[in-house]
């Protein structure tokens, strides 16, 4: 897994570079990450975190999608 969550530091970590990101939506993101991990596996869960590190607002996008 290239990207992972460090629950102690409450951040997303790039496993290759050690770069960290502390997203403001961490509490919601960790729940969504666990859901994706359980439903789709490690590859998709890591891809979710990669998108966050790249600046995509995945939680905002999800909420906007639900609102229609």
Image (cartoon, helix red, strand yellow):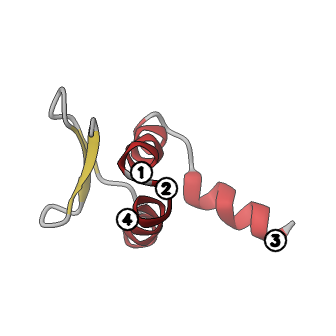
Q: Is residue 45 left or right of residue 57?
A: left
Q: Which is more N-terminal, label 4 or label 2? A: 4
Residue 67 - label: 3
Residue 50, x across and y down, in percent: 41, 38
Question: What's the distance in space between the residues labelled 2 and 4, CA to CA?
Answer: 20 Å
| Image-based side of 59 in relation to 47, left or right | right
How many other residues sit within 10 Å of disc 3, few (<14), some (14-19) or many (≥20)?
A: few
Label placed on residue 26: 4
Residue at the (46%, 33%) spot, across then down: 54
For the point 30% across and 53% down, the residue is 22
Q: CA distance from mark 3 to mark 4?
A: 21 Å
The N terminus, quarter of image: top left
Q: Earlier in the sequence, mark 1 or mark 2?
A: 2
On screen, residue 15 versus residue 47, left or right, reads left
The residue pinned by badge 2 equals 40
Q: Nearer the viewer, mark 2 or mark 4?
A: 2
The picture quadrant where one finds residue 59 is bottom right
Q: CA distance from mark 1 to mark 4?
A: 14 Å
Picture residue at 41% right of the left edge, 53% below the top: 41
Circles 3 and 4, Cβ within 8 Å, touching? The answer is no
Per the rendering, the mark at residue 31 is none
Q: Which mark is in front, 1 or 4?
A: 1
Q: Which residue is mark 1?
A: 45
Marks 1 and 3, the one that precedes in the sequence: 1
Residue 43: quadrant of the picture: top left
Residue situated in front as seen by the camera: 35 or 19: 35
């Amino acid at each position: 897994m290239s990207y992972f969550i460090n629950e102690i530091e409450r951040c997303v970590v790039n496993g290759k570079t050690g770069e960290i990101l502390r997203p403001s939506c961490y509490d919601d993101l960790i729940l969504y990450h666990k859901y994706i991990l359980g439903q789709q596996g490690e590859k998709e869960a890591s891809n979710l975190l990669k998108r966050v590190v790249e600046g995509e607002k995945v939680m905002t996008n999800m909420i906007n999608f639900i609102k229609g």
